[in-house]
Image (cartoon, rainbow, N blue to C red):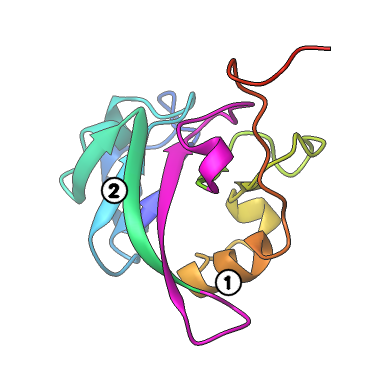
Amino acid sequence: VYHLGDVALSWGRMSAGEIDDILSQLNGNKILIRGNHDRNEVVKNRRWSLVRDYLEIKVDVPDPTTPVVIRTKIVMMHYPLRSWNGIGRGSWMLHGHCHGNLPPVGGKTLDVGVDCWDFAPVSLETLARAMDGKDIFAPDHHGERE
């Protein structure tokens, strides 16, 4: 389970025990991509196997329209990026922070905040369907300028 930040608006309002109770309800290996509201009572919780500000992984993603599996780079950060590693090669950019209010920036980017997904975790298969049809976008420094 990758959590892209803002686990709890703690700031002294929630105890470490309350946060641990919430995290105990998530199954699997839990990885935190730190958000701007994640304070020590969140970040130092023993249930995280990894805590980072930014993470890149490669996973086998099922193509939603064929039986093919595609090796895909996924870039994750709490904040959305306009350009990210592999943007021109179809890598994904997953983020939170914006609560579904960010206009599309192009490319395979997606707000995975729980408030955009019925307050529940989202499967890799669901993300693949959401990314299907999004164009590869390459606004990097290698392109031609007008």
Residue 89's place in the image compared with 115, above or below, is: above
Residue 78 on image: x %, y %: 50, 33
Task: Please tell me in which quadrant of the rendered image residue 130 appears.
Answer: bottom right
Residue 146 on image: x %, y %: 84, 12
- Magenta-colored span: 63-90
Residue 7 on image: x %, y %: 44, 42
Seen from the viewer's position, the closer of residues 12 and 59 is: 59
Q: Residues within 10 Å of mark 2 (few under 14, many from 20)?
A: some
**SS class, disc 1:** helix
| Residue type pointed to by label 2 | Ile
Q: Is residue 94 left or right of residue 18?
A: right
Task: Please tell me in which quadrant of the rendered image residue 59 appears.
Answer: bottom left
**Residue under numbered circle 1:** 126
Number of residue marks = 2
| Residue type pointed to by label 1 | Thr
Q: Residues within 10 Å of mark 1 (few under 14, many from 20)?
A: few
Label 1 – label 2 distance at C-alpha:
19 Å
Residue 70 on image: x %, y %: 43, 67
